[in-house]
Amino acid sequence: MRRLVLLAVVVGALGFIYLVVTLVQVWSAADDDQTGPADAIVVLGAAQYDGEPSPVLRARLDHAAELYGAGHAPLVVVTGGKQEGDRVTQALAGFNYLRGKGIPEEALLLEVDGTSTYTELAATARILEDRELDRVLMVSDGYHSARLLAIADEVGLDGAVSPTDTEYGAGSLLRETAAVSVGRLVGFRRLDSLS
C-alpha cells in the first residue's frame, strides 16, 4: 500500500511539474515576436459578425496588414470557416477587410473550411504545399503562440509567430496551458478530434 501511495505522489508531483513548465513556456511564447521573412503571413480566424470582423479578428488583420506592408511576405492567408449560425466565413470577412486596407486580391489566399486552430493550420499547410511554400508567419493573440508553433510543426509548416498586442487574462493562459499539455501527449490532431 505504501508503494502505491508513493507512486501516486511521485506521478502527481511529476504531473504538476509538467504543467508548471508548460505554463511558463506558454507565458514566455506569448511575448516572443519572431517576425522575419516568410512565404506567407497566416491570420488565424476569430469571430466575425455578418462579415464585420470582431475586435479580436480586426486586431489580427491589422497586424497582418502591417507585416505585409513591411514586406515580410508576399502572401496573406486568412483562415476560418463558418461557425454555427454564420452566413459568412471568418476568412471571407478577413479577405474583404484586408482588400479594404489596400492589399491586392492576388496576394490573399482564403482557407474557408477550418473551424479550429488545428483544422485552419492543417488546411493552410495543404494550400501552401500546392505552391511549394511552407515558411509561415502566424498572427494571433500572444497566449496562442506556443500551441500555434506546436501545431505548425505537426502539420508540416515551418512556423514563426508574430502576436498582436491584444490583452488577455490568466484564464486564457491556463486554457492554453491545458491544451498544449494534452496536445503534446496525445497529438494536436487527436486533441482537436476530441474537442
Image (spheres, rainbow, N blue to C red):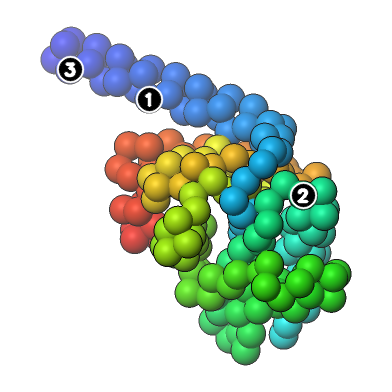
Location of residue 152 in the rendering, given as x and y in whole percent from the top left corner: 47, 46
Please tell me which residue is depicted at 72% across the width and 47% down the height of the picture: 72
Query: Which residue matches tag 2?
Result: 71
Tell me the element at label 1: helix
Inspect this view and state whether residue 134 appears. Answer: yes
Query: Which residue matches tag 3?
Result: 4
Disc nearer the start of the sequence (3/2): 3
Location of residue 123 in the rendering, given as x and y in whole percent from the top left corner: 44, 64
Front in this rendered view, residue 116 or 112:
112
Location of residue 173 in the rendering, given as x and y in whole percent from the top left corner: 62, 39
Mark 3 in CB contact with mark 2 (< 8 angstroms): no
Disc nearer the start of the sequence (3/1): 3
- How crowded is the residue under tag 3: few (<14 C-alpha within 10 Å), some, or many (20+)? few
Location of residue 172 in the rendering, given as x and y in whole percent from the top left corner: 64, 45
Query: Which residue matches tag 1?
Result: 15
Q: CA distance from mark 3 to mark 2?
A: 59 Å
Please tell me which residue is depicted at 31% across the width and 53% down the height of the picture: 190
| Tag nearer the camera, 3 or 2 | 2
Tell me the element at label 2: loop
Please tell me which residue is depicted at 30% across the width and 14% down the height of the picture: 10
Disc nearer the start of the sequence (1/2): 1
| Tag nearer the camera, 1 or 2 | 2
What's the residue type where badge 3 is placed?
Leu
| Tag nearer the camera, 3 or 1 | 1
Q: Quadrant of the C terminus?
A: bottom left
Front in this rendered view, residue 3 or 112:
112
Front in this rendered view, residue 61 or 73:
73
Q: Is residue 7 left or right of residue 70?
A: left
Q: CA distance from mark 1 to mark 2?
A: 43 Å
Rendered image quadrant of residue 171: top right
What's the residue type where badge 2 is placed?
Gly
Does residue 58 sit above or below 30 in this rendering?
below
